[in-house]
Image (spheres, rainbow, N blue to C red):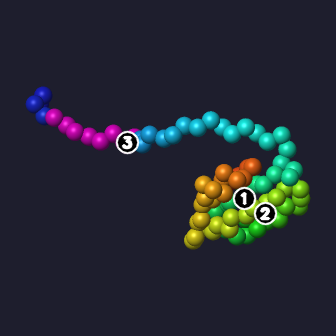
Amino acid sequence: MADKVYKCLNPVGIQNPVDIAPLAPRLDTINGKEIWLSICGEPDITIALEKRLKGDYPDVNWRIKKTYMTNAIPISEEEMKTADGVIQGIAW
C-alpha cells in the first residue's frame, strides 16, 4: 500500500504575475476636467447613467466610449493618457 504514488492538480491553479501600480491621486475637483465614461453593458443602463452624470456635473468635459456586450471597445492607452479621470465598469 505504501508503494503507490498519487498525483493530483492544485485546485487553485497557476497564478500569473501581475504588475502592481499605486493608486492615482484623487482630483480636488472634476469641474473643467476631461472624464472618460466606458461602461460595457446594456444600453438602457448606460444611457441613463450618462444622462444623469451630464445633468449633475455640467462643467465636466465628458467623453463617452460606446461599448456594449457584443462589441466591447476598451479605452486606448492614448485616451487614458489624455484623460483626467476614467469611469470604467461592466453592467449586465
Give left or right: position of 72 versus 83.
left
Residue 80 position within the rendered picture, expressed as x and y whole percent measured from the top left: 66, 53
Q: Residue at x 26, y 40 (%)?
A: 8
Q: What is the CA distance from the residue labelled 3 to the residue labelled 1?
A: 33 Å
Instruction: Decide: is 51 above or below 20.
Output: below
Which residue is under mark 2?
50
- Who is closer to the viewer here, 79 or 42? 79
Local SS, label 3? loop
Local SS, label 2? helix
Report crowding for label 3: few under 14, some 14 to 19, many 20 or more residues within 10 A (C-alpha).
few
Q: Residue at x 67, y 60 (%)?
A: 39
User: Is mark 1 in CB contact (under 8 Å) with mark 2?
Assistant: yes
| Extent of the magenta region | 5-14
Report crowding for label 2: few under 14, some 14 to 19, many 20 or more residues within 10 A (C-alpha).
some
Displayed quadrant of residue 28: top right
Residue 76: tell me if it is visible: yes
Give left or right: position of 5 versus 54.
left
Displayed quadrant of residue 34: bottom right
Which residue is under mark 3?
14
User: Is mark 3 in CB contact (under 8 Å) with mark 2?
Assistant: no
Residue 7 position within the rendered picture, expressed as x and y whole percent measured from the top left: 22, 39
Which residue is under mark 1?
37
Q: What is the CA distance from the residue labelled 3 to the residue labelled 2?
A: 39 Å
Query: How would you classify the magenta stretch by its main secondary structure?
Result: loop
Residue 24 position within the rendered picture, expressed as x and y whole percent measured from the top left: 69, 39
Q: Residue at x 83, y 48 (%)?
A: 30
Q: In front of the other: label 3 or label 1? A: 1
Residue farthest toward the top in the current orientation of the protein: 2
Q: In the rendered structure, which amino acid carries the disc numbered 2?
A: Glu
Q: In the rendered structure, which amino acid carries the disc numbered 3?
A: Ile
